[in-house]
Image (cartoon, rainbow, N blue to C red):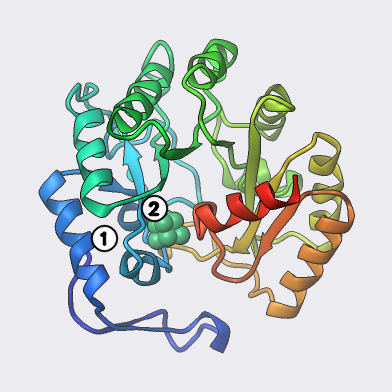
């Protein structure tokens, strides 16, 4: 998606009121757009067509998407292009660091396409980006949202933990019952759960799901029971929005009241922070979420 600087409205009239957003250019938005273009960095805000782009960019926050534009997987919910990826760009860490500096970010969120073609799944590249950011200012907080790294999971986790991410996130994306329908192999619910279990007690952990895919309320409650047992610190729950007619269809629009129920249930079950709302995404207000969790410790 290419972001324009004009006034626009997202989402058709077919969406319920709580998902209609009027969007207006604000000065911060234009600054963010300029930095993103001049630094030649990718953002998941654009590539995944995030509905919060206007709000986040107006506040001069963005989530960087590293390791190219092509993902080696082809999940049924995702707007990121599937294709043969390019070689890693050794200048990318420096460009991301420059963009962080230009935006004045204090809290940086990094994510990537999945790179099953790389021996280490791209873990070393993640660590180089984190180090380049910390070379600017060693106190900058960096949240990473990574793929599962499949066969090299253990070594990849150690490589990234060695450079001390502030928050280590891996999204389950979908509750168990629908996971195999919407995510594509080699992704699996069990692999992602194994990944998250390995992070337990080592770093602040985070995961996220989308709802409205077909799951029942009970499925979401069961999911929260499961992840509270493995000590997840932060959970995000947001409405699934199909990027196109070719993607997995939306089964229903979950009401704001139901999102509140999920938050209350998850926090009662011991998840420290449940960010639950129609437009919540993994990186939405990430800094505020981290600060809230810190205050709870
Ligand atoms: S929620 Fe995350 S991905 Fe979406 S616009 Fe905000 S920073 Fe970007």
- Residue at 50% across / 49% down in the picture? 76
Residue assigned mark 2: 79
- Residue at 42% across / 68% down in the picture? 51
Q: Earlier in the sequence, mark 1 or mark 2?
A: 1
- Residue at 86% across / 37% down in the picture? 229
Quarter of the image that includes the C terminus: top right
Residue 20 position within the rendered picture, expressed as x and y whole percent measured from the top left: 47, 84
Quarter of the image that includes the N terminus: bottom left
- In the rendered view, tell whether residue 7 sits above or below residue 247: below
| In this rendering, position of residue 218 left or right of residue 289 | right
Whether tag 1 and tag 2 are in contact, CB under 8 A, the answer is yes
Query: Front-most of 73 and 203?
Result: 203
- In the rendered view, tell whether residue 124 sits above or below residue 30: above
Q: Report which quarter residue 117 is drawn in.
A: top left
Residue assigned mark 1: 1
Residue 227 position within the rendered picture, expressed as x and y whole percent measured from the top left: 79, 41
Q: If the picture is divided into quarters, which one holds ligand 1?
A: bottom left
| In this rendering, position of residue 78 left or right of residue 128 | right
Disc 2 within 8 angstroms of ligand 1 (CB): no
Q: Secondary structure at mark 1?
A: loop
Residue 158 position within the rendered picture, expressed as x and y whole percent measured from the top left: 55, 14
């Amino acid at each position: 998606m290419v972001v324009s600087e004009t006034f626009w409205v997202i989402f058709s009239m077919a969406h319920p009121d709580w998902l209609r957003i009027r969007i207006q250019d604000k000065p911060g938005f234009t600054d963010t757009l300029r930095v993103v273009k001049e630094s030649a960095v990718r953002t998941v805000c654009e590539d995944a067509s995030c509905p919060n782009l206007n709000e986040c960019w107006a506040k001069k926050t963005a989530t960087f998407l590293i390791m190219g534009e092509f993902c080696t997987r082809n999940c049924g919910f995702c707007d990121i292009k599937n294709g043969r990826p390019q070689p890693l760009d050794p200048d990318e860490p420096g460009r991301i660091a420059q963009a962080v500096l230009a935006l004045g970010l204090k809290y940086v969120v990094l994510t990537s396409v999945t790179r099953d073609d790389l021996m280490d799944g791209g873990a070393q590249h993640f660590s180089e980006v984190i180090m380049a950011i910390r070379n600017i200012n060693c106190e900058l907080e960096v949240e990473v949202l990574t793929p599962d790294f499949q066969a090299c999971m253990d070594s990849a986790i150690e490589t990234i933990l060695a450079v001390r991410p502030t928050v280590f996130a891996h999204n389950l994306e979908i509750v168990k019952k629908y996971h195999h329908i919407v995510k594509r192999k080699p992704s699996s619910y069990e692999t992602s759960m194994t990944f998250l279990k390995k992070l337990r007690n080592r770093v602040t952990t985070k995961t996220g799901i989308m709802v409205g895919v077909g799951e029942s309320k009970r499925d979401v409650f069961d999911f929260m029971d499961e992840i509270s047992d493995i000590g997840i610190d932060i959970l995000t729950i947001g409405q699934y929005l199909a990027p196109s007619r070719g993607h997995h269809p939306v089964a229903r629009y979950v009401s704001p009241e139901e999102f509140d129920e999920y938050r209350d249930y998850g926090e009662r079950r011991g998840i420290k922070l449940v960010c639950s709302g129609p437009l919540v995404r993994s990186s939405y207000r990430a800094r505020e979420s981290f600060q809230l969790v810190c205050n709870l410790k």
